[in-house]
Each structure stands twice: as C-alpha cells, then as structure tokens.
Image (cartoon, helix red, strand yellow):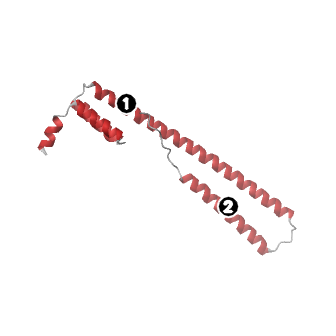
Amino acid sequence: MAALGAWAQNKTAQDYFHEGAQLYVFDKKQQAVQAVEEGLRVLPNDEQLKELYKLLLKEKQQQQQQNQQDQQNQDQQNQEQQQQDQQSSQNQNEQNQQQQQDQPRNMSKEEIDRMLEALRQQEEKLQEKVQKKKHKGERAKTEKDW
C-alpha cells in the first residue's frame, strides 16, 4: 500500500490528464472530474489540467441543461396528451348521451345498469392509460459533441 501511495505522489500532470481523459472517453465523467480535481490539488498551476477541468465542467453543465429541457418537453407532451385524452373522453360521453337521448325512454333497469357499467369501465381504462403515460418518462439520449 505504501508503494501505491508513493506512486500517487510521483504522478505527473500528464498522468492525471491522461487518466481524466481516458475516464471521460469511457463515459465515466464523474470519475474523470475527480481524477482531474485530484491532479489540480497536487499540481494547481498546470494549465492543461485546468483546461480539461473547465471542459469537463462545461460539458456537465450542458448535459444538465439538456436533461432539464428534455424533462420539460416530456412534461409538456404528457400534459398535451392528457388534455387530448380528456377531450376524447368528453366527446365520447357527449356521443353516448346523445345516443341515449335518441333512444326511446322505455329501457329496463338492467339495460341502464349495463350501460353505466360500460361507461365506468371505459373511464377506468382511460384513466389507467393517462396514468401509464404520466409515469413513463423516457430519457432522451444526447449526442456527444467531441
């Protein structure tokens, strides 16, 4: 373990730079930032490490902004879909009411109960569909610009 500690003390700025760059390439961005930060603690005046650190932080910020934008877009799509579903449900209910008004008024209690049950089931299905879409947040993949 002492040999590992001695090796860590003998690391050059190039070693920290290459470690950070390699971690970044393998999509281990948080570890890349940590490696560069460690290098800057040991070698705070190295310009190459400073520049890599700036680039990593800038990319992290852009990723966060993209994630936020994606979430807002998903929320807006969900809201629009929910409004469309509600409108569709309302239209269906109006059609059903119109059909009921067009029918003669001498329906039996059993027929009325069946129609109400069918409407209730239709409404449950619609609500389940809306809930599934609400919980379905898929993350959009972003292209790397490097």
**Quadrant location of the C terminus?**
top left
Q: Is residue 28 above or below residue 126?
A: above
Q: Residue at x 27, y 37 (%)?
A: 19
Residue corresponding to mark 2: 123
Crowd tier of the residue under label 2, counting other residues whose Cα lies within 10 Å: few below 14, some 14–19, many 20 or above: some
Q: Residue at horizontal 84%, vertical 62%?
A: 101
Residue 99 disc label: none
Amino acid carrying label 2: it is: Glu
Front one among 47 and 102: 47
Q: Is residue 132 left or right of residue 7?
A: right
Which element is circle 1 on? helix
Residue depth check, mark 1 versus mark 2: number of the one nearer the observer: 1
Q: Residue at x 36, y 33 (%)?
A: 56
Residue 23, horizontal then vertical, whole percent: 32, 40
Up-down: is 84 above or below 40? Answer: below
Q: Residue 18: x, y in percent? A: 27, 34
Among the two numbered marks 1 and 2 on one chain, the one whose residue lies closer to the N terminus: 1
Closer to the camera, 52 or 127? 52
Q: How far apart in space, not on screen, are marks 1 and 2 (Cα)?
A: 52 Å
Q: Residue at x 83, y 72 (%)?
A: 107
Q: Looking at numbered disc 1 in the image, what kind of residue is underneath it?
A: Leu
Quadrant of res 91: bottom right
User: Disc 1 marks which residue?
Assistant: 55
